[in-house]
């Protein structure tokens, strides 16, 4: 471990704050997201936490570092990406998002491949993204375990907001194409769904077997051996760990809902390219939708009906949405939710709902809204300053405050 990282780790382990300075952010327009915009607003951050939010009046606290800009928003949250395990160089050395040794990889953790020095993390940070849910990629039906991370820090463990946040399942075209040359299942959508259902059943039976053994129902030699993949599946089947189903085509979305209902899962949907075609099913499911990317390329039959208006149509239907960047196989391997939200805003979603979809919306979907997603006293000091409308392409991020520290200044 590097000396700086070691010192920081010891300081945090001993209960010290990551940053003991006072930072004041002032903006012509302040968007708390949890309430109406504030003209000539001010956010005061002390010891890493927001102390106050409101109109600027009087002088800033003595000794505070003061940042000023045109518009201030909460730090942005990307609800689903592969940045951190998929790298900018697009070579084998930094392609760690897909374990292609088999289609069921529940034991995998994004945490164990997350690279804190990945340049794409800095790229996102400089565009206002302070938190990401990073997951394994689209290749496998049972992809592995996602985690929630900050976009800055010395080590993966120090950056982890939640080391394991969901178990990811992929439906649609990619899982059935991954092993087609090896003639290895799944080769069809039926095969993908069956594999996922079987894996969940195995996890449930594994948990039941270990529980029986713990109650003395089996001889010691008959206790199921520990299996990391089945442990993760058992947690999902028991509702302890959310499932995240990635599905694009309408029928794949419905299949995800059907499987989740069969096993009584706590789940979210990601992608939902054709979500606007199955609004009734989505309303009945009542689950968060991590929609996007909004500017998704029409690169396969499952994305032929992609629409810039999809987020707006989902939101108008009363569905809970967050905008995600998703997995990107094309260089530079990362989309920026700020830009995705801007296109959604211009295509029916509007400014306020688009900002909510990359701040408080994803924070709520990920269960981290007590710390992130809005500017409220007591929450983590996560603020982004812009020199103009955040969704105008000529505007720039001028400063980012995260965990109470100024981590970027243009």
Image (tube, helix red, strand yellow):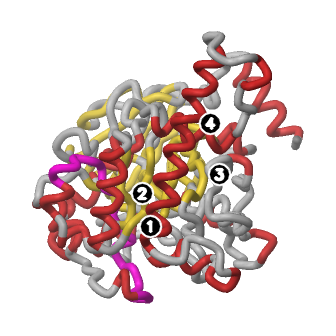
The residue to which callout 3 is attached is 110
Q: Residue at x 25, y 78 (%)?
A: 308
Q: In whole angstroms, how far apart are the C-alphas of marks 1 and 2? A: 7 Å
Residue 3: % across, % down: 88, 38
| Image quadrant containing the C terminus | bottom right
Q: Mark 4: few, some, or many residues within 10 Å (few <14, many ≥20)?
A: some
Residue 81: % across, % down: 52, 61
Give the mark toward the camera: 3 or 1. 1
The answer to which of marks 3 and 1 sits earlier in the sequence is 3
On screen, 235 above or below 323?
above
Disc 4 vs disc 3: Cβ atoms closer than 8 Å? no
Going by the image, does 199 lie left or right of 371?
Answer: right
Disc 3 vs disc 1: Cβ atoms closer than 8 Å? no
Q: Mark 1: few, some, or many residues within 10 Å (few <14, many ≥20)?
A: many
The answer to which of marks 2 and 3 sits earlier in the sequence is 3
The answer to which of marks 1 and 4 sits earlier in the sequence is 1
Magenta run includes residue 320:
no
């Amino acid at each position: 471990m590097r000396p700086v990282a070691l010192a920081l780790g010891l300081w945090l382990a001993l209960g010290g704050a990551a940053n003991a300075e006072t930072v004041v952010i002032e903006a012509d327009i302040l968007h708390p997201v949890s309430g109406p915009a504030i003209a000539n607003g001010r956010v005061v951050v002390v010891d890493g936490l927001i102390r106050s939010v409101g109109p600027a009046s009087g002088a800033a606290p003595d000794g505070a570092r003061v940042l000023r800009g045109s518009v201030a928003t909460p730090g942005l949250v990307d609800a689903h990406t592969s940045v951190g395990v998929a790298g900018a160089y697009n070579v084998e050395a930094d392609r760690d998002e897909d374990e292609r040794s088999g289609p069921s990889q529940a034991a995998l953790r994004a945490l164990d491949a997350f690279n804190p020095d990945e340049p794409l993390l800095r790229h996102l940070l400089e565009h206002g993204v302070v938190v990401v849910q990073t997951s394994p990629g689209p290749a496998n039906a049972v992809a592995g375990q996602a985690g929630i991370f900050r976009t800055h820090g010395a080590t993966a463990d120090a950056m982890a907001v939640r080391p394991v946040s969901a178990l990811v399942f992929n439906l649609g075209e990619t899982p059935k194409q991954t092993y087609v040359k090896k003639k290895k299942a799944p080769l069809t959508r039926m095969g993908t769904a069956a594999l996922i259902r079987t894996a969940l059943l195995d996890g449930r039976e594994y948990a039941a077997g270990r529980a029986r053994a713990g109650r003395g129902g089996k001889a010691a030699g008959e206790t199921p051996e520990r299996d990391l993949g089945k442990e993760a599946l058992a947690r999902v089947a028991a509702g302890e760990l959310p499932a995240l189903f990635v599905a694009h085509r309408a029928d794949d979305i419905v299949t995800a809902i059907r499987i989740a209902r069969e096993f009584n899962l706590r789940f979210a949907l990601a992608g939902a390219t054709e979500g606007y075609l199955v609004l009734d099913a989505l309303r009945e499911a009542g689950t968060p939708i991590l929609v996007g990317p909004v500017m998704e390329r029409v690169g396969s039959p499952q994305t032929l009906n992609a629409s810039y208006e999809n987020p707006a149509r989902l939101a108008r239907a009363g569905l809970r949405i967050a905008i995600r960047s998703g997995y990107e196989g094309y260089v530079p391997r990362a989309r920026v939710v700020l830009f995705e939200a801007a296109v959604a805003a211009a295509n029916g979603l509007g400014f306020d709902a688009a900002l909510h979809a990359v701040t408080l919306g994803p924070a709520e979907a990920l269960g981290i809204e007590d710390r992130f997603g809005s500017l409220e006293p007591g929450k983590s000091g996560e603020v982004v300053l812009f020199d103009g409308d955040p969704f105008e392409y000529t505007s720039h991020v001028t400063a980012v405050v995260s965990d109470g520290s100024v981590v970027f200044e243009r």
